[in-house]
Image: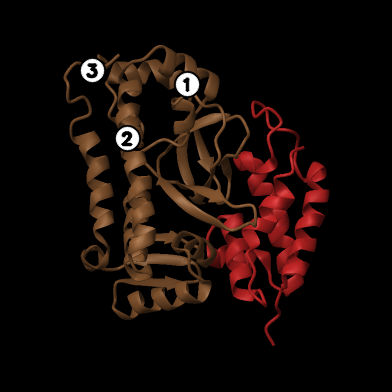
Amino acid sequence: MKRTISEQEFKRLCEEVAAQASAILPGTPEGTGGAGPLNEPESTCLLFKALLARVCRHLELDPEVQMAELGDDDGFAVAQTLEEHMEPEFFYSRIIDNCFNRRR
Amino acid sequence: MSENRLLAALPKEEYGRLEPYLELVRVEFKQLLIEPGVPIPYVWFPHDFVTSDVVEMADGSAVEVGTIGNEGMAGTPLFLRERTTTAKAFAQVPGAGMRMRSEDFIREVIDRGGPLHDLLHRYTHAFLSQISQTAACNRLHTAERRMCRWILMMHDRVKEDRFPLTQEFMSLMLGVTRQSVSATASELQEAGLITYTRGMMTVLERRALEASACECYERIRQQFDRIFEDPWPEGGVGGGD
């Protein structure tokens, strides 16, 4: 039976990643004036990688297989994995923004 | 030279003057380029990434008001001497591009003037035309015709027949539910114009898409093409100011 993810479950995973952002990210990107993590490609990539790993663990999927099938962009892989497994449907971008755009 | 059409249109000497301030970067899916109410840190010149200007309402609903790709620059509010803006700009299609720090842009392009400054006046007009045309289109045209218009605009900017496009974003862009997006995409797919599988849009029949799109696509495209067909119509490169 296909595993699913709800809005609350996804929110919890985002909050987990956001809480660990200081460990995941190497430091405030230089030159952004302390901007949020989604302002720089490296930090965007690292956060989505961490989020994809958690979403895949929840859905019992292999993140490497998801990446291989969905292209080489972690953020897109997260979005598409959600679109295929969320139940009921929800707007995930808003949750991502709310969690990751809290300014550090 | 740059793959961005604005930068590629510059005279060689002018591009050489600005090149030390331009940084080649990879832009990731969902990467935030401009945040509402936050000083704009960079202006961006996409090569093959595409960014959307999105306006969000207090209840969380949102709609796309502008699309920027290799024909333009993200950061026009800064060009108009506004350090902050109300719309959010983020990458819808990842890819490469160039960015310039705001301080460098203000000093080297706005204050100093020159060819890029002149070109950006015309670009800003075309971009405003795109926004007003989109507003009219959203009000007057069907979801199917708007989807065709929007797929064509993306196709022009990414320069590939296949590109990632989430259903969530299409629903925001078209102002319809995800079920409607799915139904409209299925109709276009059945007609053999596109394939849309696992978030990947593939353009199969561009001419048929053009025929199915509303008039807005052609109007917007012509507005931008006019800039690059004759970048300085009054003669005298950089002589506008």
The tint of chain A in the picture is: red
The 10 Å Cα crowd at callout 1, few under 14, some 14 to 19, many 20 or more, is many
Image coords of residue B182 (percent x, y): 46, 75
- Image point (82%, 44%), residue name: A23
- Image point (48%, 23%), residue name: B81
Closer to the camera: disc 2 or disc 1?
A: 2
Q: Nearer the viewer, residue B70 or A88?
A: A88
The tint of chain B in the picture is: brown
The kind of secondary structure element at disc 1 is helix
The 10 Å Cα crowd at callout 2, few under 14, some 14 to 19, many 20 or more, is few
Occupied quadrant, residue B215: bottom left
Q: Give me the disc on residue B68.
A: none
- Residue denoted by label 2: B125
- Residue denoted by label 3: B237
To which chain does the residue with label 1 belong? B
The answer for how far apart the CA atoms under marks 2 and 1 are is 19 Å
Contact flag, marks 2 and 1 (Cβ < 8 Å):
no
- Image point (27%, 41%), residue name: B224
Dot 1 or dot 3: first in sequence order is: 1
